[in-house]
Image: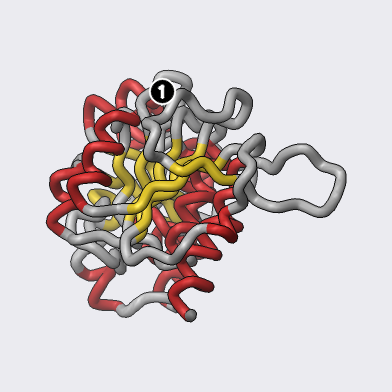
Amino acid sequence: MPNTHISSLHSPHIERVKALLGSRGKKFRKEDKAFIADGLQSVREALQPKFEQAPRIEKLYVTDAGLLKLQGEVDASLLEAIDIFPVTDEVMNAMADTESPQGILALCSFTEFTLYKLGQLQPKRVAYFWEIQDPGNSGTVIRTADACGFDAIVFSPRSVDSYSPKTVRATVGSLWHLPVIESVSLEEMYEFAKEQGFSISAYAGESERTFLELLPSEKQLLIFGNEARGLPALAEDVVRVRIPMLGHTESLNVASAAAIAMFHVGILQREH
């Protein structure tokens, strides 16, 4: 429901949003279990989450033009249930961290998803990323996993914050389509996969086998390494594979490699 129009650049709402987006934003996001989503696509998907315990909108800030955009994209009943704050263009510019904000910005809350909760969903396709550092890459792999029908994305400790503004923006709404689990060690991920009956493959450019040699499996865990350092030591029964390449490049960006592998496992193997 709409609240009082915010026009003052000294509004505490601006301070709250800027704290979650600023240089110390990660600290506040972790402490408050809150983050910012901006733009039509992200907010549209936030209003229509695809799994239980997906992040939810706590406050929605919109300019007059931004509200018109949303009203043209989502059912009116979805907006009626949201705490909406109309703002001026000046206030939106002060809040947003993009040069040309779309006039739509949401303060969202999240609950931490766990491997235990994931196990209750009986997942079949999961991708794990060890110490991924680039927010664009992390957002892209979440979006790709969504497109390829994966059940979850898991990140190791010392990976980039999944709720940083750049990551959220790069997911283009997929953050509300599948669980994202943070700070899971490689050992924890391995134990979970073994208990759940997953076959496990790790992608490394120096491997002799290619992923095309792997036999299809009903439940699969794919492991990807750090952008610069690759993979750490792995258990002996984890199959290391590479992506075959015909050109002269020595390696692929982790997001590109993950896209190829997840398409193969999530789409091609499923269809055949």
Within 10 Å of the Cα at label 1, are there few (<14), some (14-19), or many (20+) other Cα atoms?
some
Q: Is residue 113 visible?
A: no
Q: Is residue 263 above or below residue 118?
A: below
Query: Where does label 1 land, which residue?
Result: 158
For numbered disc 1, what is the local secondary structure?
Answer: loop
Residue displayed at 54% across by 64% down:
263
Looking at this view, is 151 or 236 the one in front? 236
Q: Residue 262, image x and y in percent?
A: 51, 58
Q: Is residue 192 above or below residue 160?
A: below
Looking at this view, is 142 or 84 the one in front? 142
Q: Residue 198, image x and y in percent?
A: 30, 53
Q: Residue 133, image x and y in percent?
A: 53, 29
Q: Is residue 109 left or right of residue 96?
A: left
User: How many tags in the picture?
Assistant: 1
Q: Is residue 175 left or right of residue 134?
A: left
Residue displayed at 15% across by 49% down:
117
Looking at the figure, which quarter contains the N terminus?
Answer: bottom left
Residue displayed at 46% across by 28% down:
131
Looking at this view, is 38 or 250 the one in front? 250
Q: Is residue 266 visible?
A: yes
Residue displayed at 85% across by 50% down:
247
Q: Amino acid at mark 1?
A: Arg
